[in-house]
Image: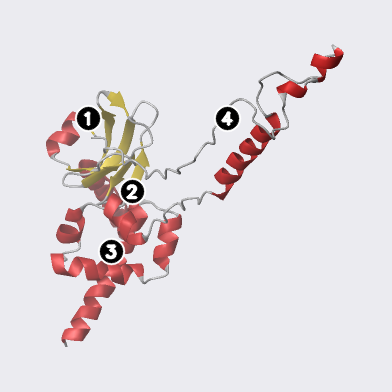
Amino acid sequence: MKVKLLTTISFFTYQFGISQTEKLLYGKVISQNNALKNVEVINKTAKISTTTNALGEFSILANVKDSLIFFSKGYYFKRLKLTQNNLDQNDLVISMIIKPEELEEIVITNIKFPHVGAAKHGSTVNPSNSLQKYTGVYDGTIANGMDFIAMGGLIADLFKNEKEAPKKKTPQVDFKKLVATSIPESFFYQDLKLTIEQKALFLEFCDADPKSKIILEHSNILSTMDFLYVKNEEFKKLNSGIKN
């Protein structure tokens, strides 16, 4: 009986402690006063995430000092460390800044167009030999008209040139580029405790792992961070082993 009573008291004490700290936080993400939908809202501390709805609104469980990350393709990420004031107000408004668009490279092909004018000597269209002149019957030719057979050949050549023009291949995104565009620099130095010199070597170490290809196929900022955390532990053990 005493064991059951102690278990019950411990359970309610735990629930009360959780309710005192953890709270469902509400907020909205905007850019230039416009609501942003499908923004990834990540509680990096609790390792949970959600996305904004069509009105840019979201809700996520959070505690004081939790680190929230807001990520959306085409925008600079936003990071926020929650304070007690944030939880008390419970109405976050996050403003994100759009990234400038990068113009794709355009390949210009120089196409020479031959001169097209009145029919010349030797052309299939010869106004002076028109049957209409001698018989009075219209034979379908146009006096001083264009050589349509030659024009047909010209058009065919143009389409042929377009088909033969080299197509630019879409560049493949590698793991290091994915990390550079989605993970903040502070994550490496503050969270992973890496130095500037170690960062480049660490990313090479991660890129060599076949699991990095899986991260590329199913890119998600939370799963990418988890992968980097795991690889960081391996990286530190490897470094300590080399020093010893």
The reply to whether residue 1 is visible in this rendering is: no
Instruction: Look at mark 4 in the image and give the residue it sits on.
Output: 116
Residue 87 placement, left or right of 228 = left
What label does residue 229 carry, if any? 3
Give the mark, 4 or 1, whose residue is nearer the N terminus: 1
In the depicted structure, whether residue 208 falls above or below residue 91:
below
Instruction: Look at mark 2 in the image and give the residue it sits on.
Output: 48
Give the mark, 2 or 4, whose residue is nearer the N terminus: 2
Secondary-structure class at tag 2:
strand
143 or 54, nearer to the observer: 143
Of marks 2 and 4, the one in the foreground:
4
Q: Which residue is drawn at 66% across and 21% down?
A: 145
Give the mark, 3 or 2, whose residue is nearer the N terminus: 2
Secondary-structure class at tag 4:
loop
Residue 180 placement, left or right of 115 = left
Of marks 3 and 2, the one in the foreground:
3
Q: How crowded is mark 3: few (under 14 residues within 10 Å), some or many (20 or more)?
A: some
Q: Which residue is drawn at 28% across and 31% down?
A: 29
Quarter of image, res 239: bottom left
Q: Which amino acid does label 1 sit on?
A: Val
- Locate the N terminus and report the quarter of the image it occupies: bottom left
Secondary-structure class at tag 1:
strand
Q: Residue at x 31, y 41 (%)?
A: 102
Of marks 1 and 2, the one in the foreground:
1
Residue 196 placement, left or right of 168 = left
Secondary-structure class at tag 3:
helix
Instruction: Look at mark 1 in the image and give the residue it sits on.
Output: 93
Of marks 4 and 3, the one in the foreground:
4
Give the mark, 1 or 2, whose residue is nearer the N terminus: 2
